[in-house]
Image (cartoon, rainbow, N blue to C red):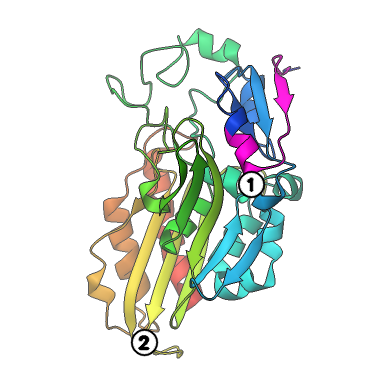
């Protein structure tokens, strides 16, 4: 049996109280606990105090702000609430889809969108018991100074396995944080580093308070696809989020813009570039799925950081990209 280490717990009721509690040395946040608690059992961290967000009602809002042109999603909204919300399903079907296939119903009932955005990176060499890790001398992310994925590498390449992050990037979302210096926001695509040991730009003492997703201004299609071995529980082994903006609300409408974001490559998702060859083509063009899938395959090269061979996972990115676009046609 894996036991939790000893720690103190605090349950503030306001964002200001959360920020104050995080000023304690070594304090860590816990929302649904679906990520941090298993990591504590594996002794990947041992904070002296956990600051719970469960009582902070200000983080639980989910509302459309037409004046600002955004959907404001509180960081404490659960994945189940996000997946089942009617406006989210209508305006951002790929986001509802991604939130609705995270792990299992029990995990989605507890896990929050803020937790999914700040999900720790994962690697086949670190997400193991402390006993297992000691047998290989640890790694850059835990107890050691060697990367077993990229021997000689100086940066940790543990993978970002969040389902919602690639979708939020594809939708041009912004993340809002509150900390000792006040509130700030930035594009969520700029929130992540390529180093898996500390892969976000969250500063000490900060807490994610909301995600701002711009409301669509014209016809579009969105989709999220991931490959896992099992239909539930598993983290994605590859994932792809797509957004296609159209000139009109018709199957034969011309493509005006394409955004493709691929996850589970490294510590941050990758936005695919140079997709101009499909612009101006009708979405119904049978060549579009292959053109986009080939470009994604060319630019995205997984590492041996999660189970299954990197070469096979790379092929699965092509397959699921092609299937996703066909589902939108």
Q: Earlier in the sequence, mark 2 or mark 1?
A: 1
Establish if 232 lies above or below 70. Answer: above
Q: CA gap, disc 2 to disc 1?
A: 38 Å
Residue 72 in the image: x percent, y percent? 57, 62
Quadrant location, the N terminus: top right
Camera-side mark, 2 or 1: 2
Left/right placement of residue 11 relative to residue 182 reads right
Read off the magenta span.
3-19
Establish if 79 lies above or below 303. Answer: below
Quarter of image, res 130? top right
Residue 24 in the image: x percent, y percent? 58, 21
The residue under the point 65% across, 58% down is 100
Q: Mark 2 highlights which residue?
A: 247
Establish if 2 lies above or below 213. Answer: above
The residue under the point 37% across, 36% down is 303
Q: Mark 1 highlights which residue?
A: 230
């Amino acid at each position: 049996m894996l036991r939790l280490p000893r720690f103190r717990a605090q349950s503030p009721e306001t964002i200001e109280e959360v920020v104050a509690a995080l000023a304690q040395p070594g304090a860590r946040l816990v929302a649904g606990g679906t990520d941090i608690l298993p990591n504590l059992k594996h002794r990947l961290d041992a904070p002296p105090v956990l600051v719970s967000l469960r009582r902070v009602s200000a983080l639980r809002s989910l509302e459309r702000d037409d004046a600002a042109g955004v959907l404001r999603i509180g960081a404490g909204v659960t994945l189940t609430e996000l997946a089942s919300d009617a406006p989210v399903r209508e305006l951002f079907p790929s986001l509802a889809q991604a939130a609705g296939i995270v792990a299992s119903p029990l995990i989605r009932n507890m896990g929050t969108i803020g937790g999914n955005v700040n999900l720790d990176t994962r690697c086949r060499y670190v997400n193991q018991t402390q006993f297992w890790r000691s047998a290989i001398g640890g790694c850059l992310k835990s107890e050691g100074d060697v990367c077993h994925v990229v021997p000689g590498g100086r940066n940790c390449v543990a993978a970002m396995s969040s389902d919602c992050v690639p979708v939020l990037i594809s939708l041009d979302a912004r993340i809002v944080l509150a900390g000792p210096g006040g509130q700030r926001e930035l594009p969520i695509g700029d929130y992540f580093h390529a180093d898996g040991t500390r892969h976000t730009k969250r500063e000490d003492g900060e807490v994610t308070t909301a995600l701002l997703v711009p409301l669509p201004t014209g016809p579009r299609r969105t989709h999220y696809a991931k490959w896992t071995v099992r239909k539930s529980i598993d983290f994605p082994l590859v994932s792809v989020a797509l957004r296609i903006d159209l000139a009109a609300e018709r199957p034969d409408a011309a493509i005006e813009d394409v955004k493709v974001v691929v996850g589970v490559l490294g510590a941050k998702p990758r936005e695919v570039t140079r997709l101009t060859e499909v612009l101006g083509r009708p979405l119904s063009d049978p060549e579009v799925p292959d053109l986009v899938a080939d470009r994604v395959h060319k630019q995205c090269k997984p590492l041996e950081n999660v189970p299954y061979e990197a070469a096979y996972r790379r092929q699965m990115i092509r397959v699921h990209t092609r299937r996703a676009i066909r589902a939108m046609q």
